[in-house]
Structures are given as C-alpha cells and as structure tokens.
Amino acid sequence: MIEITCNDRLGKKVRVKCNPDDTVGDLKKLIAAQTGTRWDKIVLKKWYTTFKDHIQLQDCILFQTLNITRRRHKIRYEIHDGMNIELYYQ
C-alpha cells in the first residue's frame, strides 16, 4: 500500500491509500469518495504532466519531445509512497 497526498490549493488536501498496481482512474475514484466530487471531473497533475486514467500508478511515463533535436526522450515519473499530486477540476 502506498499513500498519496492530493492538494487542490483551494483548501482541500486529501490523503489516499492505494496499491501500486491500481490505475489512475481508481485513484480518482478514491479521491472522489473523500472529497464528494465526481471522479470524471478530477484531473491529476504533477508539474505539466497530466496522468491518464488507464495507466497504472507504477507505470506513469511521460514522453517529452525536444523541439531543437526532434528526438523523443523518455522521462519516467513514478507515483511513489508519500508523493504529492496536484488536484484540478474540469
């Protein structure tokens, strides 16, 4: 079990415990149960990375395209225990 802290910077700060093999969609449903919002209106971000619903928490990967060299570099973002994620609403 890992614990993830989500903060919307408007006064809501939620701690959620989940398994690493859960998807981001499952994490959104756990957050929605604690905050009282609909899970499909929740957007989870870390800096400029928006986490998609079908990805598992242990496999969150972002591909960054560099405009100068036109090469793709793989940057791995794992959601680990104690991580803070930004919580936004659509």
Image: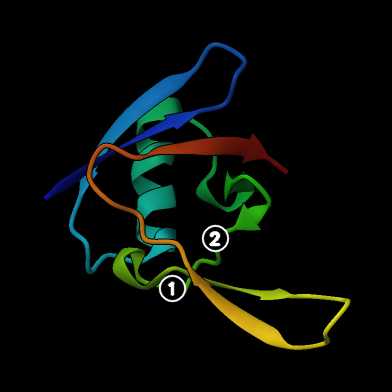
Most extreme residue toward the bottom is 71
Q: Position of residue 79 (x, y in %)?
A: 35, 54
Q: Residue at x 22, y 62 (%)?
A: 20
Amino acid residing under circle 2: Phe
Q: Position of residue 58 (x, y in %)?
A: 30, 67
Amino acid residing under circle 1: Ile
Q: Residues within 10 Å of mark 2 (few under 14, many from 20)?
A: many
Q: Are marks 1 and 2 in contact (CB under 8 Å)?
A: yes
Quarter of the image for residue 22 reads bottom left
Q: Residue at x 61, y 48 (%)?
A: 43
32, 47: nearer the viewer: 47
Which residue matches tag 1? 55
Q: Position of residue 3 (x, y in %)?
A: 22, 39
Q: Where 70 sits versus 47, above or below?
A: below
Most extreme residue toward the right is 68
Q: Residue at x 28, y 51 (%)?
A: 80
Q: Residue at x 51, y 48 (%)?
A: 39
Q: Residues within 10 Å of mark 1 (few under 14, many from 20)?
A: some
Image quarter hosting the C terminus: top right
Disc 1 element: loop
Q: Where 43 sits versus 8, above or below?
A: below
**Residue 84 circle label:** none
Would residue 26 appear left or right of 53 to someone viewing this image? left
Which residue matches tag 2? 51
Q: Position of residue 52 (x, y in %)?
A: 55, 66
Rounded to the nearest angstrom, the CA distance separating label 1 from label 2 is 8 Å
Would residue 17 appear left or right of 51 to someone viewing this image? left
